[in-house]
Amino acid sequence: MKTILVPTEHLPSMLPAIETALLLAQKFGSCIVGFPLRPAVSDLVAMDPDSGLTMVAVKENDAELIRHAEETFRSFMERHQVPQRSGTGEASLSWTWHKDAPSGHDYVGSYGRVFDIIVLARPGSEWQSPSMITLESALFESGRPVLIAPPSAPQSLGRNILIAWNCSTEQARTMGDAMPLLRLAERITIATVEGATVAGPSGEEMAHSLELNGIAAEPVTLKPGKRSAGETLLNKADELGCDLIIKGAYTQSRLRQMIFGGTTRHILANAQLPVLMAH
């Protein structure tokens, strides 16, 4: 995980996201790349012959968003004494700023394809919160794993991992993306929630596969009782003192989860620790 993309907004939740990215970068000696994330200009104003003055104001606002985003990212790196990357060659712990990024949340999905991982702040319902559009663009369009930061900066990352195993294709893909972190973990628990799986290999079979790769993991089966699968997994992660959850995203469709709820949506809304997801 040598290249880390951090789409940057001028929001209170941005600092925990950059802090999470730095914890990851310190593990692998990575280059962290930031860029200004903001709405597309076309989303902010209706184009018509009389909108000249409005467009001027919108473009000035866009420039201000870019300035604030870069200031947030750059000042964080300087405070933490992370060197700015110069030259070419193999990545080391460093940062750089992609100043020419176009506006629009969909850019996360396209530009993210050339990175090992994308780090985002957790989406929220408040108006000053990151957008679900950004997260879904990263998950569905980049083909890369996404690390979702909690509202408060974590103290550690990837030492004690909970794998939310539901036997699915999405979870298997996420496991492959997470292997660099799994190899460095001190403790790994493979948690399967009874009644919340699809047809596929058991947690015990996943543990055996990891063992063959030289990675020790303990499989456990959780009985949810009256709780949802998402609640059960978060409670177990809290009980074990985990500092990372690895979870395949949207085994059920997004529409179904939006209407009826689902494990992915619950964890996205409530996790107080970093969550690594892929689809």
Image (spheres, grey):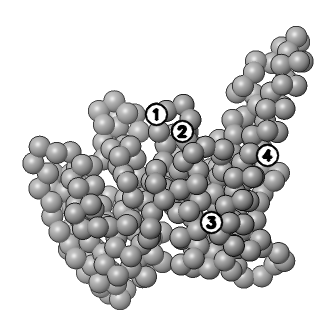
Q: What is the C-alpha distance between the residues marked 4 and 3?
A: 21 Å
Disc on the earlier residue, 2 or 3 = 3
Where is residue 96? Give x, y as percent: 75, 65
Element on which disc 4 rests: helix
Element on which disc 2 rests: loop
Residue 34 shows in this picture: no
Element on which disc 1 rests: loop
Q: What is the C-alpha distance between the residues marked 1 and 2?
A: 7 Å
Residue 5 shows in this picture: yes
Task: Identify which residue is drawn at 53% across, 56% down.
Answer: 16
Residue 129's tag is 2
Left or right, residue 41 beside residue 161: right
Residue 67's tag is 4
Where is residue 244? Give x, y as percent: 39, 65
The residue where tag 3 is placed is: 4
The residue where tag 1 is placed is: 125
Disc on the earlier residue, 1 or 4 = 4
Image quarter of residue 199: bottom left
Task: Identify which residue is drawn at 16% across, 45% down.
Answer: 227
Task: Identify which residue is drawn at 40% across, 52% down.
Answer: 249
Disc on the earlier residue, 4 or 3 = 3
Q: What is the C-alpha distance between the residues marked 1 and 3?
A: 26 Å
Q: What is the C-alpha distance between the residues marked 1 and 4?
A: 25 Å
Q: Residues within 10 Å of mark 4 (few under 14, many from 20)?
A: some
